[in-house]
């Protein structure tokens, strides 16, 4: 008999703080958008795309990322972005999710007739419309649905990534590739702060995504310094394909409030340098620092299993060590389409494979809301979190949980 029923998992209020908009389309929406825009896909059936692109298992991270080329191609206009954002919110609410932070890289969607403001506004419209539709129908004693948008800079890109990146390279012909990447990140940070200040578009955070190997977080200090000085919250993809040093850089150089993935936090064998106090002590100090400062780790179990062939099984995931060290963790999907998952699946996977007590589960739920980059002032966030916990405790009683 399952300790936590599927009904309980579905009903409890949840978050998804690490979900990529361009990795989380409905498959039929991808097909419809491609047909409307006359974009040739590898297949125009859901079965064909699952066989050729969005597979049940991937050989490595490179194969995992292939699907983004197709989703990105259909998301180059306002209608497509608004629709996919709207559907993402509805799909999450259907699983009991009450708060999401949708993230994406606007510069992958920008072109000369579709500027940063246009891209973000389209996504915000979709999420805002979904919030309105959802909250108009829920019961009075239920916590409302809400959202935030996280803007992603890229650790690496070239002129083939998008029209914007192609133009950006052309106007900086005397800068090397790294300098161009740094300038694009800084430009994005300034755009995000300006739009957050001057509009009610719910930009809540800044992220750094893309391959870690060869593209250190420290290269983006200028962009993150600007974000920090303007009081915007920060998360960083780190420790997904690189070791503890990547996480260390995210915290010390970029002052990350949260860490995306953090899979290799405990892997001393991936420490490239030779710390004078030894690799074990280096790792222990890093873990303690993360714990003491409540730097929340955005854990993506299914995604990590698909992109990390060295993992022998879900129980070898470092989530076990994160729990053992009492880290602040929250369960996330990463990419709903590419990983064939949803929030309820991630909780089911965690509860079936790790020793999680009812008290620990409640903490994980609470971390998601408390460590969110909630758009409204802190006093309103406290009230919102209280409504979440009150509702959670009501469901505990309903399902006989202690």
Image (tube, helix red, strand yellow):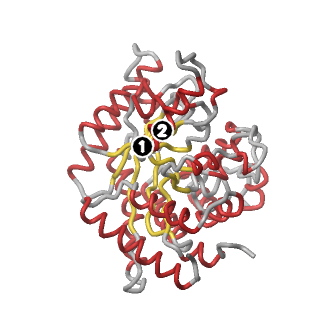
Q: As drawn, is 63 to the left or to the right of 378?
A: right
Q: How many marks do you count on the picture?
A: 2
Q: Residue furthest left?
A: 198
> Is residue 236 positioned above or below 86 on the image?
above
Residue 307 to residue 36: above or below: above
Secondary element at image label 2: helix
Label 2 Cα neighbours within 10 Å, binned few <14 / some 14-19 / many ≥20: some
The reply to whether residue 106 is visible in this rendering is no
> In the displayed structure, does residue 322 sit left or right of residue 248?
right
Q: Are marks 1 and 2 in contact (CB under 8 Å)?
A: yes
In the image, farthest residue toward the top: 174
Q: Position of residue 188 (x, y in %)?
A: 35, 37
Residue 292 image label: 1
Q: Is residue 150 left or right of residue 30?
A: left
Q: Residue at x 39, y 43 (%)?
A: 293
Label 1 Cα crowd, 10 Å radius (few <14 / some 14-19 / many 20+): few
Q: Residue at x 59, y 49 (%)?
A: 324
> Cα distance, mark 1 to mark 2?
6 Å
Residue at image point 57% right, 17% down: 273
Q: Work out whether residue 83 or residue 222 is closer to the camera in this orientation and state it.
A: 222
Q: Residue at x 66, y 50 (%)?
A: 40
Residue 187, given in percent of the width and then of the height, sits at 33, 33
Q: Is residue 252 above or below residue 69?
A: above
Which image quarter holds the N terminus? bottom right
- Percent across and percent down for residue 327 are 51, 48
**Residue topped by disc 2:** 288
Image location (x, y in percent) of residue 368: 46, 59
> Residue 12: in sight, yes or no?
yes
Name which quarter of the figure residue 402 lies in.
bottom right
């Amino acid at each position: 008999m399952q300790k936590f029923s599927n009904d309980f998992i579905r009903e409890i209020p949840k978050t998804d703080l690490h979900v990529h908009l361009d990795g989380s389309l409905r498959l039929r929406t991808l097909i419809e958008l491609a047909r409307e825009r006359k974009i040739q896909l590898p297949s125009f059936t859901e079965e064909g795309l699952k066989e050729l692109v969005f597979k049940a298992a991937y050989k490595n991270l490179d194969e995992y990322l292939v699907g983004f080329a197709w989703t990105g191609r259909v998301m180059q206009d306002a209608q497509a972005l608004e629709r996919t954002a709207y559907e993402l919110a509805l799909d999450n609410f259907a699983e009991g999710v009450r708060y999401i932070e949708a993230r994406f890289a606007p510069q992958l969607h920008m072109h000369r007739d579709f500027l940063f403001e246009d891209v973000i506004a389209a996504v915000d419209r979709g999420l805002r419309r979904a919030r309105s539709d959802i909250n108009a129908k829920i019961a009075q004693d239920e916590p409302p649905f809400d959202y935030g948008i996280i803007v992603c800079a890229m650790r690496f890109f070239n002129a083939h990534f998008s029209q914007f990146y192609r133009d950006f390279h052309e106007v900086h012909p005397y800068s090397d590739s790294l300098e161009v990447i740094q300038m694009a990140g800084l430009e994005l940070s300034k755009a995000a702060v300006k739009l957050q200040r001057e509009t009610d578009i719910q930009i809540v955070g800044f992220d750094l995504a893309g391959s870690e190997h060869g593209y250190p977080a420290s290269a983006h200090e200028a962009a993150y310094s600007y974000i920090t000085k303007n009081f915007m919250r920060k998360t960083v993809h780190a420790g997904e394909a690189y070791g503890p040093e990547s996480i260390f850089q995210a915290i010390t150089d970029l002052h990350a409030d949260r860490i995306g993935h953090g899979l290799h936090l405990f892997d001393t064998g991936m420490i490239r340098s030779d710390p004078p106090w030894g690799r074990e002590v280096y790792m222990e100090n890093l873990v303690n620092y993360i714990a003491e400062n409540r730097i929340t780790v955005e854990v993506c179990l299914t995604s990590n299993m698909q992109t990390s062939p060295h993992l022998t099984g879900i129980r070898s995931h470092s989530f076990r060590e994160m729990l053992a060290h009492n880290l602040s963790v929250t369960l996330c999907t990463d990419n709903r389409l590419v990983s064939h998952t949803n929030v309820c699946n991630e909780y089911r996977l965690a509860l079936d494979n790790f020793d999680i007590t009812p008290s620990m589960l409640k903490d994980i739920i609470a971390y998601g809301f408390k460590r969110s980059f909630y758009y409204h002032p802190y006093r309103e966030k406290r009230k919102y979190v209280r409504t979440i916990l009150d509702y959670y405790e009501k469901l505990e009683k309903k399902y006989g949980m202690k």
